[in-house]
Image (cartoon, grey):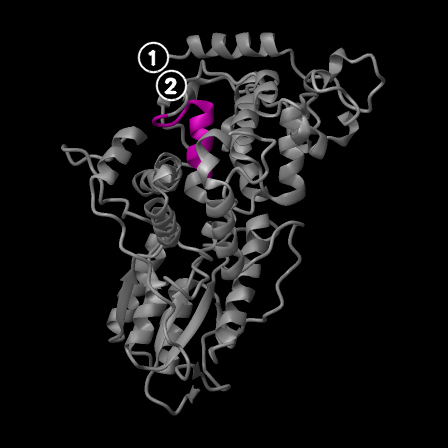
Amino acid sequence: MVDAHSPAPVLVLLRDDYRVADNPALHAACATGQPVLCAYVQDAALQDASGTRIADWAQAACAQLATSLHEQGQTLFMLSGPTRLSVPALAQAVHATDVFWNRRYDAPGIAADTDVHASLKKQGVTVHSCTGRLLFEPWAIRTQAGQPYRVFTAWWRAARNLPEPPPPLPAPDIRGKNYAPARTLTLPDGVRLHRVGTQPPALPSGWTSGEKAAHANLHRFIENALADYETQRDRADAPHGTSLLSPYIRVGQISVRQIWHAIRHAEHQNPHLATPAEKFLAELGWRDFAWMQMFTTPDLATRNLRAEFDHMPWRADAADLAAWQQGQTGFPLVDAGMRQLARTGWMHNRVRMVVASFLTKHLLTDWREGERWFYAQLLDADAAVNAMNWQWGAGTGIDAAPWFRIFNPVGQSEKYDPAGQYIRTWVPELAALDNKTIHTPWKSTQRLKYPAPIVDLKLGRLRALENWKNLPK
């Protein structure tokens, strides 16, 4: 360990990239040979609201990273306060020569980093902005006219014609490079620096935080589920048919480059995996596509990208919205999904599409209500992905599902949970029904402690289509 009397340190700022391996900012900082001070930046104005699931998940990720660093003699500090003030102040207080971070792509984050960069430059501090969150930079893939793509398939085709993403970086050697700032460090009012604890908060059952847990999930998926991914990914009754990696990606406990190259390695070893592997890689591509949209359209989470939907007469029915949020709509697949979300902070992707379609079309509720609810509940709440998915489901975004594509929750249930296994797990009051009636419990002769449907599916569909037809074109 080095102390405050040692050579000037470099700073590594961590923001949703809580891993040691394939962390370009940390790797580059360690390569300088100087002492390293690692700090998690807590800025209330730029981070998820306290009380949301993602805030707890990020806190757990931070604690796990602190443990990993501690095992190698490195301390993780929390730097709290406005980013524009706290980062330049810390750099000045410890006489840092360089600051490293992995760049972010949301408008508030970009603005804050731009201001910090300017302040540090005035102080004579060199800033290193690294690529560590995406496969491709949001500006890297453009049409021949130099415009952002509006259709994923065309974007993906262009992406696959580019060189492969670079291989992931190994974990750097950080032993003996820890910088311990003086206890009497002088910082401005409102700015604090303290050690991050290694005790994570309580998490929903079934989830384990950490880099090791993330890579264990990836290994499990490749070994047991990748081969059947193309056929099983939509099955709600196949709990391990998908990778379950999204929460780990969200807080950077595993990088998309690590996942990409692990999948490609598996494919090279087993050529029969080529088709499902490509399908899975495309899902990673969708995440980049979402961030390309967020980068070029900062108000993705609040504005209809198809302006005609500004005239949609959304219903503001508080009772319907509450029934949807609480999993009390009377439609088993919808209710199972919403209860899974409430209990675990996660929901199967096919079911996410069904509940989004149900809210925005059958209930004619503004998609932004669903976007906000999901963001507060999801462990993998990603600003760009969540907004893009809701605009896709509501038909208001680019390359979105057309408005007239309205998922029938009964048909979806019968197709993707035919024996009712998923429903029985999350809606236990229907567990005794047979495999057919469980999808339409209102037809049962049994007395059930389960709500009647809150909307007539046929009438709700017709209402949605009628309102869509009346929009200005």
Q: Is residue 44 above or below residue 458?
A: below
Q: Nearer the viewer, residue 442 or 193?
A: 442
Q: Position of residue 326 (x, y in %)?
A: 69, 32
Q: Nearer the viewer, residue 398 or 125?
A: 398
In this view of the protein, can residue 462 be seen by the observer? Answer: yes
Q: Nearer the viewer, residue 148 or 308?
A: 148
Q: Position of residue 275 (x, y in %)?
A: 36, 34
- Pointers 1 and 2 in contact (CB under 8 A)? yes
Instruction: Say which element carries label 1.
Output: loop
Q: CA distance from mark 1 to mark 2?
A: 7 Å
Q: Is residue 64 magenta?
A: no
Mark 1 and mark 2 lie on one chain; the one further toward the N terminus is 2
Q: Position of residue 8 (x, y in %)?
A: 32, 84
Q: Main secondary structure of the magenta part?
A: helix
Q: Amino acid under label 1?
A: Lys
Quadrant where the C terminus sits is top left
Q: Quadrant for residue 255, please give it.
A: bottom left
Q: Position of residue 38 (x, y in %)?
A: 42, 72
Position of 170 with respect to 241 (left or right) is left
Instruction: Say which element carries label 2.
Output: helix
Q: What mark, if any, has residue 473 been given in the picture?
A: 1
Quadrant where the N terminus sits is bottom left
Q: Is residue 387 magenta?
A: yes
In this view of the protein, can residue 302 be seen by the observer? Answer: no
Q: Which residue is mark 2?
A: 308
Q: Amino acid under label 2?
A: Glu
- Label 2 environment density (alpha carbons within 10 Å; few <14, some 14–19, many ≥20): some
Give, as a single range, the part of the protein colored magenta.
386-399
